[in-house]
Image: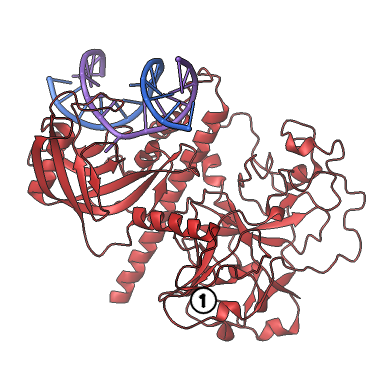
Chain colours: A red, B purple, C blue
Amino acid sequence: MVRARVAASQADMLQVRNMVRRARLIFEALRGRCHRNTEHHHAGRNRADMRALSAMIDGELCLYRDVRIVGPVPGVLVGDAFNYRAELLVVGLHCHTQAGIGYVPASQVSEGHPVATSIVSSGGYLDDHDNGDVLMYTGSGGRPRNGGDHLSDQEFQRGNLALSYSYNYDVEVRVIRCHDCDASPSGKLYVYDGLYKVQSTTYGPGKSGREVCRFKLVRLPGQDALGSNTWRAARDLTDALVAKIRPPGYLTMDMSKGKEAVPVPVRNTVDQDVSPLEFEYLACSEFPAPPKPVRRGHKCCIYSKTACSEMSSKCAPSGCACVKRSGGGGPAYSADGTLVRGRPVVYECGARCGCPPRSCPNRVTQRGMKHRLEVFRSKETEWGVRTLDLIQPGAFLCEFTGDVLPADHPRIANANTNASTGASMEEWGGIVDPRKFPPRWREWGDAPAAVLPDDGEEPPRFAQCPAPGYVIDVSKRRNFAAYISHSRAPNAFVQLVVRGDEDESCPHLMVFAMETIPPMRELSIDYGVDQ
DNA sequence: GATACCTCAAAATA
DNA sequence: CTATTTTGAGGTAT
């Protein structure tokens, strides 16, 4: 009975989590399209985020619009990070594009009083004070809209009134904190920090001399680690890594010993296990050379050595043979190196293409890691991998490497390839079968296409690719990707990639982010090892 | 419903 | 580079 209920709630969790991800992907796809199409607005005043939000409201694609949720929002986790205020509306976390205090209007509450749902704290108010667990929040009003000191007294109206009733009724308030962040397109990042309660409300002169409403919000215990605090901690840690200072608990600052483009630290503050250091590090899988040139006379980027760096040129996106070969109606990667949409296989330019390896936009995974990831020991998942950076959806993370064995190798028959969490590698044999990976690539980039009205783009026809003819043995040589844990609501997925004239039955296993991943969050992929 | 007024945005400009 | 201006979205109350 209990187990069935737990299983059901886990299934619900997976579903709402996927709903949230889908809504956010649609928002990002719409925003990208609005950003490119500036025809309806003057080039300067192009609020792509707002236009995307409007389109989603019109199309009824925003979550929880009909009910104003007080308390946790299904599918949104503490620590989730958002690039735009508009994105908060998309998932139902906060209901205003600008205002700081969201609330249920008095007309919708049986008692006839407004009740706060959420606040956004940007730290821009003189009287704010923030210790993480305790937040002194200043009410709204009395101030020019674009900031500055208070010019008149605040009153207990609207949001201020709602927050004071949240105190009276002793109900939870969601807190979202705003941080400066270079990795966000808006330059700001909105981090959901969980549920707080108003412990006191006061009214008195603020630092500007005018009367302000002040609210003392205290974080409820028993929630996940504070998103904003871990975000700050990750930034401090990254600074330490740059300064080559080894903080306590770290076994090494780079388990790859320089083989990866970005050092991969290993941290264990749980026990004495040092097993990630005890194998040969393999940064790239070694595939057998094809018996003969697979594609004789393979031609790509033959027009100009510099063509690939100019996206409008003959090479990309329209003239490149490798881009055409991937199908899907456009280049696999955008100019900034993010995967536009998943596909059965991505054909990158390769050794025999004429384009420059360092700048060709169709060589993203060849240039190696971009983000700082660390291997860490946890009580729940033994070893795991987490990010120190904010990672945007579609970003390349790493290759999944190991020794390549032919799929008909005699070892495979005896090996139990169920690499489920909790089983040690000795138990599951260290064999990872890429043919068992569910086609998660379909979810990446497909949801937006399903709802966007067609604008002349023909439906994508993907290149077909034979199933991988090999398995990966990670028992001897591997990279850190083998420590990425399994999930059925994963935040990353494996995309098959073939370069140039490589053997199509031996695609590389490349890990890409499939949602916005905040710092210090564990990475997960779907190995397809359970139902 | 139409309207006025509100707001811890975001982009462009000085 | 920062400070300021510009523009304007959805929500709320009337």
Quadrant housing the N terminus of chain A: bottom left
Looking at the image, residue A188 sits to the left or right of residue A505; the answer is: left
Which residue is identified by label 1?
A420
Q: Residues within 10 Å of mark 1 (few under 14, many from 20)?
A: some
Find numbered disc 1 in the image and state the secondary structure of the residue it sits on. loop
User: Considering only vertical position in the picture, is A144 above or below A373?
Assistant: above
User: Can I make out residue A531 in this image?
Assistant: no
Please, is residue C12 above or below residue A350 in the view? above
Location of residue A332 in the rendering, given as x and y in whole percent from the top left corner: 67, 45
What's the residue at 49%, 57% (across, down)? Answer: A238
Residue A356 appears left or right of A435: right
Amino acid type of the residue tagged 1 in the rendering: Ser
Eyeballing the image, is A199 above or below A246? Answer: above
Along the horizontal axis of the image, is C1 left or right of A327?
left
In which quarter of the view is residue A160 placed? top left
Residue A451: % across, % down: 50, 38
Chain name for mark 1: A
